[in-house]
Amino acid sequence: KAGVTQTPRYLIKTRGQQVTLSCSPISGHRSVSWYQQTPGQGLQFLFEYFSETQRNKGNFPGRFSGRQFSNSRSEMNVSTLELGDSALYLCASSRGTAEAFFGQGTRLTVV
Amino acid sequence: QKEVEQNSGPLSVPEGAIASLNCTYSDRVSQSFFWYRQYSGKSPELIMSIYSNGDKEDGRFTAQLNKASQYVSLLIRDSQPSDSATYLCAVPRGGSNYKLTFGKGTLLTVNP
């Protein structure tokens, strides 16, 4: 059974640009959550989608947005990138319970 | 009080010993608790979930939950060098099971 797939694995962007990250959940999982991991702040919740609707949102600025498609695949977008957005972005999928399974992550570097 | 607190470590144990990792949480209504293992440069991997007071065993891993004390722990018996990783405690918050709050993690090193 395939796990959570995130693309791309690595990205380098310039300040002010925008970026889109993609996540394909485990087959049958309808909840997709996004997290940001940095050495200083650890793992922080960004938002969660279920059946194409955002159900939960963390304390991040509006530059961070996401969406979910009818096949449960999800994308997150960060606009007007700042140096502080450099982080590992993790996607997790769940099926009916709180057990969340993470993808390999996208390492974003903003220069 | 932080929502989820863990001993920052690092924790160093000899091979074959028992490693004890601790976590406290602030939200009294939390009903489920998770332990993740994260190797350096990798993503978190779910290794244990616990929902009821008491102990839950899975191989060399035992999770212990005490809701009255708002405390959850992870014991690793017969520790192996391959257990060397950061262990993250996670608790759903805000009434939603899908919004996990993570502790900062405890770095465990098992010395051969």
Image (cartoon, rainbow, N blue to C red):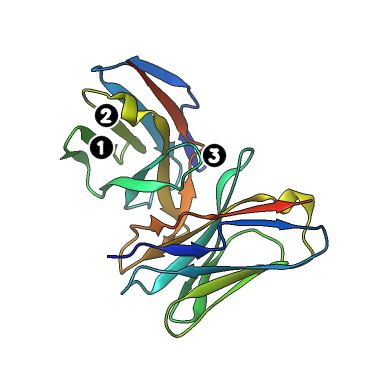
Which badge, 2 or 1, comes first in the chain's sequence? Answer: 1
How far apart in space, not on screen, are marks 3 and 2 (Cα)?
23 Å
- The verdict on a common chain for dots 3 and 2 is yes
- The verdict on a common chain for dots 1 and 3 is yes
Out of B36 and A106, give the one closest to the viewer.
A106
- What residue is shown at x 64% (from left), y 38% (from top)? A40
Give the foreground label among 1 and 3: 1
- What residue is shown at x 47% (from left), y 54% (from top)? A104
Q: Position of residue A88 (x, y in %)?
A: 58, 50
Which element carries disc 3, helix, strand or loop? loop
Residue A36 placement, left or right of A2: right
Residue that carries the numbered disc 3 in the rendered image: B2
- What residue is shown at x 73% (from left), y 67% (from top)? A63
Which element carries disc 1, helix, strand or loop? strand
Instruction: Report how many numbered discs are placed on residues in the image.
Output: 3
- What residue is shown at x 31% (from left), y 64% (from top)? A97
Residue that carries the numbered disc 2 in the rendered image: B75
Residue that carries the numbered disc 1 in the rendered image: B63
Marks 2 & 1, CB-CB < 8 Å contact: yes
Amino acid identity at mark 2: Leu
Q: Quadrant of the rendered structure where residue B76 is?
A: top left
How far apart in space, not on screen, are marks 2 and 1 (Cα)?
6 Å
Q: Position of residue B73 (x, y in %)?
A: 32, 33
Q: Position of residue A10 (x, y in %)?
A: 61, 55
Residue A60 placement, left or right of A94: right
